[in-house]
Amino acid sequence: MEQYGIDLWADNNFIIAQGCVKVNYKSSPTLLEITNKIRKNDIRGPLLLRFPHLIDKQIRSIYTHFQRAIEENEYEGSFQAVFPLKVNQYPNFVQHLVKETIPYNYGLEAGSKAELLLAMALNKIDAPLTVNGFKDQNMIDLAFIAAGMGHDITITIEGLSELEQIIDAANRSEQKTLPNIGIRMRLHSLGSGIWAKSGGIASKFGLTSTELIEAMELLKAANLIENFTMIHFHIGSQIENINPLKKALREVGNLYAELIKMGSVRLRNINIGGGLAVEYSQHEQKLDKNYSLEEFSNDVVFLLKSIAVNKQVPQPNIFTESGRFIAAHHALLVAPVLELFSHDYQEKSIRLKEENPPLVTELNELFLTINEHNAKEFLHDALDHLESLLTLFDLGYIDLLDRSNAEVITHLIIKKALYLLSDNKTPELNRLQVRLQERYLLNASFFQSMPDFWGLNQHFPIMPIHKLNTNAVRAATLWDISCDSDGEIPYNDNQPLKLHDVNLDEEEYFIAFFLLGAYQEVLGMKHNLFSRPTEITINITDEGYEISNMITSQSIESIIDDLGYDSDEILQSLKNKISLSKTLSSKEKDVMILQLINHLKENGYLQTVQ
Ligand SMILES: *Cc1c(COP(=O)(O)O)cnc(C)c1O
């Protein structure tokens, strides 16, 4: 049976049992029972399911691994972490994260004024708070206010002009506690992967070695050297290969030691940014990363220790800003399949005449007598006959009904042959799979729910949540309901996705997309005005599970308002057009107006029952 690479990407969070995907925790409910329960409330579109226990698991995992590496290496610095809000700012994620991580003193990282204000409101007062990104005077003022409130805040400067602004603000301020200052390093070591642009000499962020020397002079002259406590780097998201990180750590470890030697008396923290990768791959031959968290934490601790010991400086406290690693696992999307598009290629669509062209009769013979032994030969004959029949059609010798019969019968022969030869995967058979591919139309928008697929070709694990004890035989292309040909996940021979042959008149079929908890939600686009899917938090208990924090998908009316229209005016204009109609009775008019009001209150996803 098809396993969809669940052993590679699911990290044991989800398992297959009795043909269904189960949440592998406490009472282990299936995703199907959760989906069905939510859909009982008349919810038809895609569902974004959040599992808070998977947020906790990732946080526990990063702290435990670093703690273990610290003990094994007899490391003298500490480990601390902040969550970068840009990865997921949604309340049902962040509020849980802040509430459940008190024992760890886990903090937040902000990269804009809006994120900083959120962080100042939500972060525990003694947990670290870091600020990155480009800053104006207002953002610096906010950081001063945060320090005044008592937050342990560090502003990381991206360039010298920001440092000058901070020095000005400090000169003007009469506050007793000022924010700490961090400096982002511009490393010569490069990152790797599609998100690699954050590292390297040409990167958008950080100070060069010459600028660092200047920064030290400015800090000393302003009497702020004691506020300089952290250096920071971030070589890019989803680091696939551990080697560039090791190079960066060596460079940063030495920069740290040099800066201390130059008089940075309170510099003790190295912030290694984010980038810890998540395994998205469903295929063993194409893994996304070449290291484990164990190796990652060992390398960081070991390298920073050896440089500090060598250069005789204090061993630094290690900060991380991992976002993807913490957030990706907790959220998934369940999308109902609305339609299978090649269903017309069925036996019942064969419409043989009394008298058929000889090649069609032969095709039909092949179809009726194909078996395990002759499958390959019959398959070749059928493909050959189809070629000839299509040529005959172009020349006007056979009619549309003959052509349709030829196409349907050949399709059925290929399907049968592939089934009979399924243990025998030759390149030729794989190519034929593509010809047979089925198009599954999903009640979802890929632009909204997995924008990195559209923008970066990022692959997310995809699998049905049930029927897993029956053979998935159809090579699948997935279509979303947006009117855009990019709203398609095409069948890919290198990473084949096989789905089930289902009859939607008789049963429902649900496809899930996993690892969507990092970046996808806030990057999601309202293309075609499809809004965020209905979101639900699911707490798994020993006895079952609890559904909470349901936020139904945004209504059409409210999306219209977001665009800058006034939905009342839009409704008024619709009403006016109805009232001016010369063909409708006044009763019909009243009914239609009521219908329109209801439609505006609905969300845009298809309300079809499947
Ligand atoms: C985006 C970002 C992160 C988070 O990176 P992940 O790959 O999600 O762990 C951390 N630090 C900085 C400065 C960032 O810009």
Image (spheres, grey):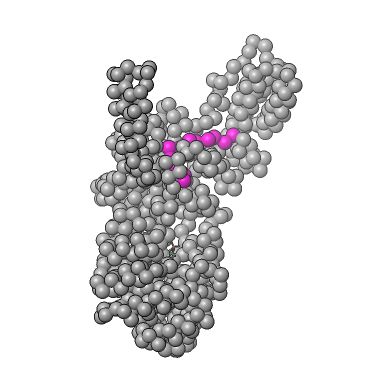
Does residue 129 appear in the picture of this structure?
Answer: no
Nearer the observer, 247 or 448: 448
> Image quadrant of residue 597?
top left
Image coordinates for residue 450, horizontal then vertical, percent: 45, 48
How many callouts does the rendering have?
0
Nearer the observer, 603 or 520: 603
Horizontally, residue 257 falls left or right of residue 434, namely left
Ligand 1 lies in quarter? bottom left
Q: Is residue 143 above or below residue 474?
A: below
Nearer the observer, 356 or 176: 176
Residue positioned 44% across, 86% down in the render: 217
Horizontally, residue 282 falls left or right of residue 431, namely left
Quadrant of image for the C terminus = top left
Image coordinates for residue 121, horizontal then vertical, percent: 27, 63
Q: Which residues are magenta?
A: 436-447
Horizontally, residue 389 falls left or right of residue 30, namely right
Q: Is residue 68 above or below residue 348?
A: below
Image coordinates for residue 565, horizontal then vertical, percent: 37, 42
Q: Is residue 221 above or below residue 482?
A: below
Does residue 445 appear in the picture of this structure?
Answer: yes
- The answer to whether residue 238 is magenta is no
